[in-house]
Amino acid sequence: MTDPAAPATLTRTFGALSDPTRRAVVRRLVHGPLTVGTLAAEHAMSLPAFTKHIGVLVDAGLVARRKVGRTVECTLRPAALAEAHAWLDDMTAFWTGSLDRLEALLDDTQEDR
Amino acid sequence: MTDPAAPATLTRTFGALSDPTRRAVVRRLVHGPLTVGTLAAEHAMSLPAFTKHIGVLVDAGLVARRKVGRTVECTLRPAALAEAHAWLDDMTAFWTGSLDRLEALLDDTQEDR
DNA sequence: CAGACGCTTAACTAGATGGTTAAGTGTTTG
DNA sequence: CAAACACTTAACCATCTAGTTAAGCGTCTG
């Protein structure tokens, strides 16, 4: 229900989060938008390498890029993050008590395909 | 606090979850332990390919393998799943209201490295 | 105890990922 | 308006990933 088109969304979201650099960017952007340059300054790699990481986050729908003058502002997009969170929520719900909701959800939800 | 040794744990957990086959296995195991053969029967790939997926889940600490006779029983291990869930919880906490806890956590937690 | 069963390991391949340097594009500033 | 700035794109390379088939290894069963 997050987005009408949710085919391989979780795959790309979890894939994007499976890298420490990208998780650091997400964590950093929780405080608010920052430019690519500002974010890049905190990571020991070339600009092009960092740009690619941002690209992965953008492709996964986790970050939005917006040109501001000659800088590029990155903003966190909560939707994709929330979707991944919801998936894990359903899995962990089993141990945290609300089993019924879990079962119901698992029985008629197919997830990908 | 999930596990004493948590270096690149999130990287491997999210990496393991970034594959539809592996997510399907996790979802399936929520109901309880199953053998490799039973799980594999639901996926259109060779046994060795599937065994490798199980291996990835085991390496990430998401699944435990246990030999039972000539079959192998797979059990879901909630700890790693809970850790990933907690990370996303902290990120999404920002939009769900409990900002203070988030800020406090982000300021002195370093995550990986 | 020979052979089927259940799974894993080995060896290989195609394509994705994560990094590099060099060159290109658009925006500001001296 | 030339030069510096802030990225991005292109081309390349090493390593990882996800699949394949073939062979191996322990466990049951006729």
Image (spheres, coloured by chain):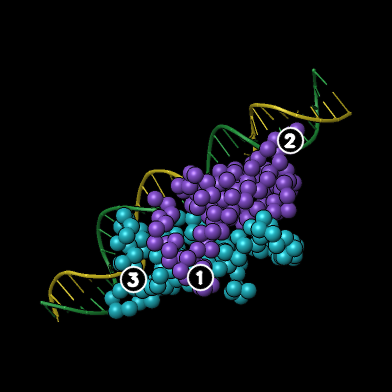
Chain colours: A purple, B cyan, C yellow, D green
- A65 horizontally vs D25: left or right: right
The three-letter amino acid code for the residue at tag 3 is Thr
Instruction: Give the chain of mark 3.
Output: B
Q: What residue sits 48% from the left and 60% below the top? A: B16
Q: Which residue is mark 2?
A: A68
Task: Choose mark 3 or mark 1, whichever is in front.
Answer: 1
Q: Which numbered circle lies on residue B35? A: 3
Question: In 3D space, how far apart are the residues under numbered discs 1 and 2 (Cα atoms)?
Answer: 46 Å
Location of residue B45 by image quarter:
bottom left
Q: Residues within 10 Å of mark 2 (few under 14, many from 20)?
A: few
Question: In 3D space, how far apart are the residues under numbered discs 3 and 2 (Cα atoms)?
Answer: 55 Å
Location of residue A69 by image quarter:
top right
SS of the residue at dot 2?
Answer: strand
The three-letter amino acid code for the residue at tag 2 is Val
Asked if labels 3 and 2 share a chain, the reply is: no
Whether B1 is drawn above or below A7: the answer is below
SS of the residue at dot 3?
Answer: strand
Location of residue B38 by image quarter:
bottom left
Residue toward you, A34 or B51 = A34
- B111 horizontally vs A83: left or right: right
* Residue A103 place in picture, x, y as percent: 43, 66
| First of labels 1, 2 by sequence position | 2
Instruction: Give the chain of mark 1.
Output: A
SS of the residue at dot 1?
Answer: loop
- A8 horizontally vs A56: left or right: left
Q: Is residue B51 visible?
A: yes
* Residue A37 place in picture, x, y as percent: 73, 43
* Residue B52 place in picture, x, y as percent: 39, 62
Q: Which numbered circle lies on residue A98? A: 1
The three-letter amino acid code for the residue at tag 1 is Ser
